[in-house]
Image: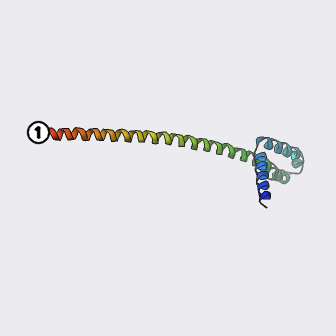
Amino acid sequence: MHSIKKFNARLAVKITNAVGSMWCAYAFAILAFISLPQAIHGGISTLIGWIAQTFLQLVLLSIIMVGQKVQDATSEKRAIDDHRMIKEELALMKEDLSDDAEMMELLKTILAKVENLNERL
């Protein structure tokens, strides 16, 4: 049973990738335009049905899927870039904190020397 699920999942991914390509959109557009003359001769309601059921559903489905892939890739790239920048900023902040700790130790040393001088006077 597991192997059937695995096969179905792989097949679904392959079909989704195929349908979500511009080449598939072109093929669907050609198929849709082949039936356009008959839809025009059928009258307004037939033409409206052709637009709604044939053109929009077939052609735009593939184009929308391609657009979603492009948007997903853009979002993923942005997330990777943001992650890299945040890591760089974190490293800088750690470096600044280290510098601040060193400065604090130096100030404590100076303060101790000043207090020591005050005691002598």
Q: Which residue is mark 1?
A: 120
Q: Amino acid at mark 1?
A: Arg
Crowd band around label 1 with a 10 angstrom C-alpha radius: few (<14), some (14–19), many (20+): few
Q: Is residue 116 left or right of residue 43?
A: left
Q: Position of residue 8 (x, y in %)?
A: 79, 55
Q: Is residue 41 left or right of residue 84?
A: right
Q: Which residue is painted at 79% across and 51% down in the image? A: 11
Q: Which residue is painted at 14% across and 38% down in the image? A: 117
Q: Position of residue 94 (x, y in %)?
A: 42, 42
Which structural element holds mark 1?
helix
Q: Is residue 113 left or right of residue 49?
A: left
Q: Nearer the viewer, residue 16 or 92?
A: 92
- Tell me the quadrant of the picture where the N terminus can be found: bottom right
Q: Residue furthest bottom?
A: 1
Quadrant in the picture for residue 6? bottom right
Q: Position of residue 112 (x, y in %)?
A: 20, 41
